[in-house]
Image: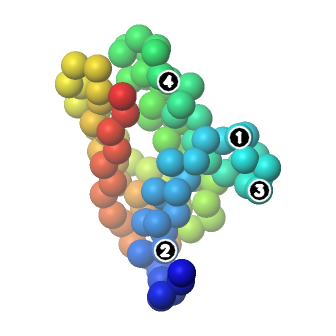
Amino acid sequence: CITQMIDGLEAVKQAVFVILETQRFEYLIYSFNFGSELQGLIGKSPLFVQSEIRRLIREALLQDDRITDVRDITIQTNGESMLVEFTVVSVFGNFTMTREVR
């Protein structure tokens, strides 16, 4: 049920969430440029994940024309999970996102 429409910065925030939650190449409804490959990091060594996660997040999000940069990516390791925080720069403004990767 659609109750309201959003646009501008809120729409970009929603798109970032959907892009990072969608596995690239898995759903025929999306183009091969949509989604992320973060699932491929599951079970890999923490050092490998730290080196690849920056690239994978940037690669996934920069496919959206409204996003011009992804910067200030920081990673905090806590046991088997990592907390990734980054700033998304869009044509509508900047915002910070946090994502937990296990």
Q: CA distance from mark 1 to mark 3?
A: 9 Å
Q: CA distance from mark 4 to mark 1?
A: 16 Å
Q: Nearer the viewer, mark 4 or mark 1?
A: 1
Which comes sooner in the sequence, label 4 or label 2? 2
Q: CA distance from mark 3 to mark 2?
A: 20 Å
Q: Quadrant of residue 82?
A: top left
Residue 59 is at least partly visible in this image: no
| Label 1 secondary element | loop
| Label 2 secondary element | helix
In this figure, which residue is indicated by the disc labeled 3? 29
Which comes sooner in the sequence, label 3 or label 4? 3
Three-letter code, disc 4: Leu
Q: Quarter of the image containing the N terminus?
A: bottom right
In this figure, which residue is indicated by the disc labeled 4? 41
The mark found on residue 54 in the picture is none
| Label 3 secondary element | loop
Q: Quarter of the image containing the C terminus?
A: top left
The answer to whether 102 appears left or right of 44 in the picture is: left
In this figure, which residue is indicated by the disc labeled 2? 11
Tell me the crowding category of disc 4: few under 14, some 14 to 19, or many 20 or more residues within 10 angstroms, Cα based.
some
